[in-house]
Amino acid sequence: MSNKHFFAIVAGAIILSGFLAYANTFAGDWVWDDVSSVLLHEHVQDPGKLFQLFREDQHAFGRGQGNFYRPLVSVSFMLDFALSHDEVLDSSEAKGYPDVKPFVFHLTNILWHIAAAILLFALLVRLEAPRAIQAIAPILFVLHPMHTEAVAYISGRADMMSAVFILAALLCATAEAKGKRRAIMLGLSGLFFVLGLCSKESSTIYPLLLLLLIALRPTADGALPGRAEWKARSTPLALAAAILAGYGALRMTVLKFSEGGESAGSGLGQRLLEKGGDSAAIGLGQRILEIGQHLLEIGQRLVETCQAFAFYIKTLFLPTGLHMEQTLAGVPAWTAVIGLLLLLACAAAIVWSIRAGHYRIALGFAWFLAAWFPISGIFPLNAPMAEHWMYVPMAGFWWALLELVLHASKNLPIRPLAPAAAILALVFLFQTVARNRDWQTNESIFRATLAENPNTLRVHSNLAVTYEYLDINLPGARRHYEAVLDAYDAQRGSGSAGLMPDEIPVRLSLGGILLRQQAYNEAYAIYGSLLPLGQQEQFRADAARAAFGAGQCLLGLGDFAGANQAMQQALAWDPALAPRYRAIMRGAPLPDIRLR
């Protein structure tokens, strides 16, 4: 078969696999952060704000500001929103955002995923991998259920865009070209790297992946590159390093959108100083305690890193129990030993492959470890594990493993690679289609997550909000808000009676639900727990809402004097509640007076 026909067949198979695996996502609704990323993001909906997207956090609207600089993702949402113009219905007053069908957004996600797989295929062709590897690795990649978190979830698009631009940059940087064409390829490699950095922060891994390709890609005679070859190949790497340095400087200055808090050690030292004593002795003691604490943290982090690695390897082969809130809670300590052995096995495979001259195998496993390292847990992250973090690392894993199997079976009378890969692809396909159903609605994804991790407060809270506002399931909302408060009570214990800041909106929401259910005494107790917050300026608005809710409860109970006193207190704390107060005085039904 000619190369042209082979390339067309493989590309067609990748496209077909991508649509077969994710066709049922077209029925999916907006879930999780999609509302703040698109529906509440006023700049995404206004093409005139295109350049503003490059000067702000991705979640500048809705849930509050974070530190996610992904302007190209927002630009892609802007384009999809414009293409969905005919499907934009009137803005919903109940929801507070445009009623837009997400079909185009889901289609775009699938196309980005397919593009990543096709570029992986192109990279394997560039590396002169066997045809079986060129065909199988991208198809397993496009079908793997771990990618549902990136593809079925509209806001997960950043992983795919980052991967596409990284792979495109690598292809341009490793192109065999001379003269003007070489300069063009060099410029394109830098451009794609910049586009990747504007898609997701993890694109910073590109220079390391390029370094691995430079070091482990054989020359024409099959040997590793010598000094002259290194010099010829290193220009794109120098450009990438310069771009990375500029990006880092910008992210630490004008593109830094949030600040961290004080360290635990500084807080401990401050408490010791407040109790009095010799400052020099306390300083030395504090330093010793800080060192001990850091050593304990490093040891714990190493254990958790090995545990997470074991989880990732297991999930690559057995992608079951997938959900958005993966944690290490309850994971046996001995899994760290398994993870360490697997990590050493990958390292050993790299060493053996280099010594045996199988440089592509070494490159694949090195790619996997290099792309995994930033999300390994060695560095503090916002979660111990996440399935979508494996989007780029997985690419190297499959081509290395498949080529290792191909090499090991070359002397067998039957080649098991093709039939085994076909079975694995079918299993992955059915698992992906099934997993996509979890992403159909907020309720389905939150319920699926709680089925796997019933202790996640964030999901309990999100499901409660879904029931309260979208599904109008007040008993369900009450149940999950109460579960969150029970968890906060358990965390607080008996040593402190203070409320946690994240607990305040939960109590306000639960009070509102109880009020609408006419459970006035229970609602009053919830609101009453928030009234002491009125003594603190930063929580006064919340206390005002609680006082107003308490007034409505007292009205329902027939205590008109107490109700008026509570509402007057609410108005003193927050005069903006006056329209609601006047509505109450005009006789509006109590449940209709919302506090949000």
Image: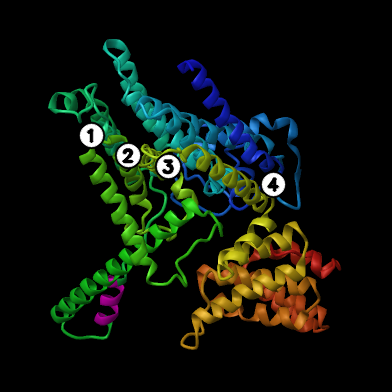
Say which element carries label 4. Answer: loop
Which is more N-terminal, label 2 or label 1? 1
The image position of residue 30, as x and y in percent, is 66, 47
Say which element carries label 2. Answer: helix
Which is more N-terminal, label 3 or label 1? 1
The span picked out in magenta is 265-273
- Residue count near mark 1 (Cα–Cα under 10 Å), binned few <14, some 14–19, many ≥20: some
At a point 48% along the width and 35% down the height, the residue shown is 136
Is 460 on the left-hand or right-hand side of 352? right
Q: Amino acid at mark 3?
A: Trp
Looking at the image, is mark 1 or mark 4 nearer the viewer? Answer: 1
Is 229 on the left-hand or right-hand side of 256? left
Q: CA distance from mark 3 to mark 2?
A: 10 Å
Residue that label 3 marks: 398
Q: Amino acid at mark 2?
A: Ile
Tags 3 and 2 in contact by the CB under 8 Å rule? no
